[in-house]
Amino acid sequence: MEKILRELSLDIVSLHEAYSSGTTVEKVLDQVFEKLAEVNDPGIFICLAERAELSEAVASLGAFDLESKPLWGIPFAVKDNIDVYGMPTTAACKEFSYMPSTDATVVRLLKEAGAIVIGKTNLDQFATGLVGVRTPYPIPRNAIDQKLIPGGSSSGSAVAASHGIVSFALGTDTAGSGRVPAGLNNIVGLKPTVGAVSTAGVIPACKSLDCVSIFALTVSDAHKVFEVVARPDQADSYSRSFEFGKLSEPSGSLSIGVPKASDLRFDGDLAMQAGYVKALETLEGMGHKLVELAFVDFFRTADLLYEGAWVAERYAAIQEFMDKNEKAMHPVTAKIIGGGKNLSAVDAFRGSYALQELKAKLSPVIDSVDMICVPTAPRHFTLEEVLAEPIATNTMLGSYTNFVNLLDLCGIAVPVAKRHDGLPMSVSLLAKAGEDALIASLAAKLHQQSGLCLGATSWPMPDFSPPANFLGPGEIELVVVGAHLSGMPLNTDLVKAGGKFLRSTRTTSEYRLFVLPGQTIAKPGLVRVEKDAGASIEVEVWSLPERQFARFVSAIPAPLGIGTIQLEDGSTPKGFLVESIAVQEAQDISQFGGWRNYVNQLVG
């Protein structure tokens, strides 16, 4: 085979550009298998697709068309606890193996979008572990340093993505399995809101907490995949419907919670500690506000995951198999899950009550910030360290991940730097359910600023940033004039709704600006008047996804409303206006030329 390795970066943006220029999918598949041979790691895949089957999948794609198939020709891998029709599902237990009759919902959606399954990847058996070594198959080698563990349980998926063997890979995440291996292999790990992506066709670990996760080389790629698969599914009783926003350029200052210094855990890894401090400095340099949070109750929540109720849930998932085949299981896996045999319904309720109490305590803490930033993992571990202390090392790895699904948070792990010893440094951004686009938008910015190559490859970060005035498909312009301006108190509401800053501009000279009386948060009111009686007012133009626009506008309280705004550039987008009766006795501040100038003179 002619050597084509590294001719193509397999990030989705670059690969689609190559396809649009005439590159064939067969050539990309040649590169996939050549890369796999070069890496020469027998622990990555449990099952590989036959090349003839892949050619059939390529033939069924049809013409290159990203409108109908947004993932056209994109190769991906699937963790082997997720069903793929025609390939056995083992959950890294040979005796458990079966042939599924259909694809898991998430796999079906990806295939319909044009993505091509390369194979099934190795994992910690029954998705129990964060280390990636609890498997009867060869242990996948960390893509950055082979002396280190790959992280788990989605070990093979993370390593395959990091090496650039595939463009993205599916994992699962109950306790951090979609984030820890991403952090240890210098890639992005997106853990959606629980219920956002169907788990129908996924072997459960803890069914009430499980997520399908996405490993990718860039945040943009991970989120593109997420947009394809995040939809309700009647086949999944835990499925939920959300109005997710789109990736946007973070604007204004976000409040970001961080563990207070005395609560941080690094288990003596000073390089990881220094890397985290540097990441926080980067966030502050971007204009965001760091808020220290007591983390003791987050850690207490994390401890619940392997105590009581949720260990019993793991046992319930495979009880029939385990009761008959326990000796066939990995000894560490059997020991952990077997602990659920002696738990009672009383223990389950006690665990549920303990979680509810912690949720009640932590809810106002979580609500007090826009998101939380933690290290993805406290430290790197060698294979020898983990094999010598399999339980203690796993527990340490879950310090910043185990509580996330229990508290119904979404999360994304993102590389932010290379440590002085060459190992990857990663942080995870966490937020309330449904805020997936918000944390991904900031993660994308962090990743872009890192200057890192993608995963374990030499591929540079692709340039996928649209121009500042880019209005994407399905987006509506919105003119904001006051408290929703960048850096103002309500700007985060706009960002959370999927808002994307487009441009600063001014109205025509037909408007007057007033301070609205009786407002909890100070706001102005913009009124259109006769041309000779008005002034030009500074405004910002943002975009909102169509679905979010209606929801955002419906929440606007009287006397504010939405109308057509005449801008000095000749455009006429929708924007904030106020009923004229509300400003009859209000202070006219038109002479300041805009709300920001007025506010600045008050504080100056």
Image (spheres, helix red, strand yellow):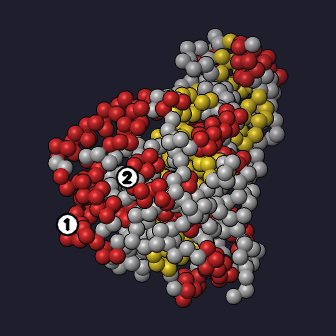
Q: Which residue is mark 1?
A: 323
Of the image marks 1 and 2, the number of the one nearer the N terminus? 1
Q: Nearer the viewer, residue 132 or 12?
A: 132
Q: Residue at x 47, y 55 (%)?
A: 385
Judged left or right of residue 224, residue 465 is: right
* Residue type (three-letter) at the residue carrying disc 2: Ile
Image spot of residue 225 (x, y percent): 55, 61
> Helix, strand, or loop for circle 1?
helix
* Residue type (three-letter) at the residue carrying disc 1: Asp
Is 356 above or below relative to 141?
above
Q: Which residue is mark 2?
A: 391
Q: Residue at x 72, y 42 (%)?
A: 502
Label 1 and label 2: CA atoms lie apart by 23 Å
Q: Residue at x 62, y 21 (%)?
A: 523
Q: How many marks?
A: 2
The image quarter containing residue 488 is: top right
